[in-house]
Image (tube, rainbow, N blue to C red):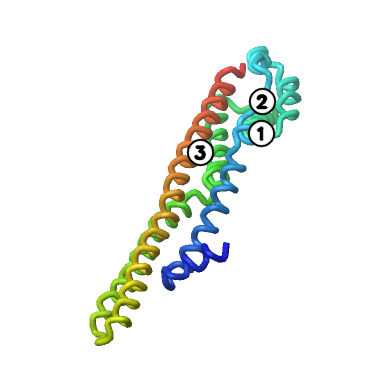
Amino acid sequence: MSTLFEFLSKGGLAVYPLIALSVFSWAIIIERALALRTSSLLSSLPPDWRSYAIAGEIDKLSKILSEDNSQISLILRALLEDYKAKNLNRSELLSTAHALIDLLIPKVEKNIALLSVIASVAPLIGLFGTITGLIKVFSAFSFSSPDEALKLLSLGISEALIAAAMGLAVAIPSLIAYWLFRIQANSVLSKIESEVIQLVRLLP
């Protein structure tokens, strides 16, 4: 571990914010991977639950939905409560459903945009480290002593390459995770919307 830190420290000052961004990005990736688990968002209800909606057995359907703690079950239960209490028509129910789904979007997409920001900023910080390393490379030629010039030249090249590599090492996983989570979030929201619309159409 100490050898790794010694190696990274040769990348200059740019390495430290990159390490912080790496820790932050992986914290987001782990948090989103746990939060976007299908079991916590989509229902694990029995396949025949829709038959209760067709038959107009709203109380039985509400009881079944209350046994499932997924986000989609919460939305469906809220719709059924409005349907019973306010006697809403299909158009009004669809409006309510879309409002409930809109409230869910920030929860599903939470912190995903930050991964895109990290993926954009990390290469720039790496580029900054590369430039400072190259400055050391060119300043090496001003030394009259060959030993000092070679030492500074070696340090400058190491700093430039390590900073550039570190920037890419932070940016690439963040960018991949961003698009994977974006696709997964859109898929989950699409499935929830489809189930909700289907329930509204099945209600008598």
Q: Residue at x 52, y 62 (%)?
A: 4
Q: Residue at x 68, y 15 (%)?
A: 52
Task: Classify 10 Å Cα crowding around label 3: few (below 14), some (14-19), many (20 and above).
Answer: many
Contact between marks 2 and 1 (CB within 8 A): the answer is yes
Cα–Cα span, label 2 and label 3: 18 Å
Q: Position of residue 187 (x, y in %)?
A: 49, 32
- Left or right of residue 20, residue 119 in this image: left
Q: Judge whether 197 appears above or below 176 on screen.
A: above
The residue under label 3 is 185
Q: Residue furthest front?
A: 147
The residue under label 2 is 44
The residue under label 1 is 70
What amino acid is at disc 3? Ala
Q: Judge whether 97 appears above or below 90 on screen.
A: below
Q: Residue at x 68, y 30 (%)?
A: 77
Judging depth in this view, the residue of 141 and 111 nearest the camera is: 141
Please tell me in which quadrant of the rendered image residue 132 appears: bottom left
Q: Is residue 115 visible?
A: yes
